[in-house]
Amino acid sequence: MLNQTIILKVKQRLNKLDSQDYDNIETWMILEAFNKAQVEWARRQLHGMNTLREGDEQSTRRKDDLQVLLITEPMAVTERKLFYEGPIPEDYLQWKRVDITAVSDCCTSDNMVVYLAEEGNVSELLRDKSKQPNFDWRETFATLKDDNILIYTNGEFTIDNASFTYYRQPERIEITGIVNPYTGIVSPADILAEFKDDIIELIIDETVSILGGDIESPNQMGRGMQTAERNN
């Protein structure tokens, strides 16, 4: 869907398309609200806080709707005493999985299972024989801390390479010649919304709800949110 179509639809839902009173709603405000709505929509679908209470990959629709945000990137890791450390990408939204190539004295394994654990339980996990990193079982754990992923080895093996599969932030839309509200720089080119048109329609309704709240228009705010949720 073209960005100008999005702007047109938002103004129509706000009943501002032909009105002489625009309540000072400028294009950059609509872009900011739309980009905010994208993130709110994605977080709600991933967590399952939607009408059907369906979270990440719990139905064909969720898999289909969210696959555009699911990517795999190589991860540079640095060896520490008991773990390897790699940075969380700047566009990170939600964890999916980590894949590693582990090397021990005997052989190399590409099928290690790395599950996400709580940082507060690291001491117990390293001590527990059934949960600590184990090359023979092809199993270990990782935690998130200080914008880094910590993949624990407990000195049992080394990590040759690693990759991170995660849900990224939605791409922010921009319009040529309009100031980007996040950077303060005039956008040199259009950046289109990356979701399917049916999802964009839902995000437009959520955008209207956000703007309706900003301009203290309860009718538009309530209608936008109800429409967005009813069609999820």
Image (spheres, rainbow, N blue to C red):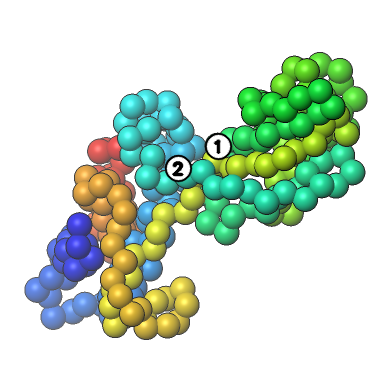
Query: x and y percent of residue 82 in the render?
Result: 87, 39
Instruction: Tell me how far mark 2 sits from mark 1, CA to CA.
Output: 8 Å
How packed is label 2: few (under 14 Cα within 10 Å), some, or many (20 or more)? some
Where 18 falls versus 169 (above or below)?
A: below
The mark that comes first in sequence, 2 or 1, is 2
Q: Are marks 2 and 1 in contact (CB under 8 Å)?
A: yes
Residue at the (62%, 37%) spot, across then down: 98
Report the residue marked by disc 1: 96
Where 88 falls versus 9 (above or below)?
A: above
Query: x and y percent of residue 192 in the render?
Result: 28, 62
* Horizontal side, residue 158 vs residue 215: left or right: right
Q: Which mark is residue 175?
A: none
At mark 2, the secondary structure is: strand
Tell me the amino acid under the disc marked 1: Lys
Tell me the amino acid under the disc marked 2: Leu
Report the residue marked by disc 2: 70
Q: Nearer the viewer, residue 209 or 98?
A: 98
Where does the C terminus fall, quadrant-wise? Answer: top left
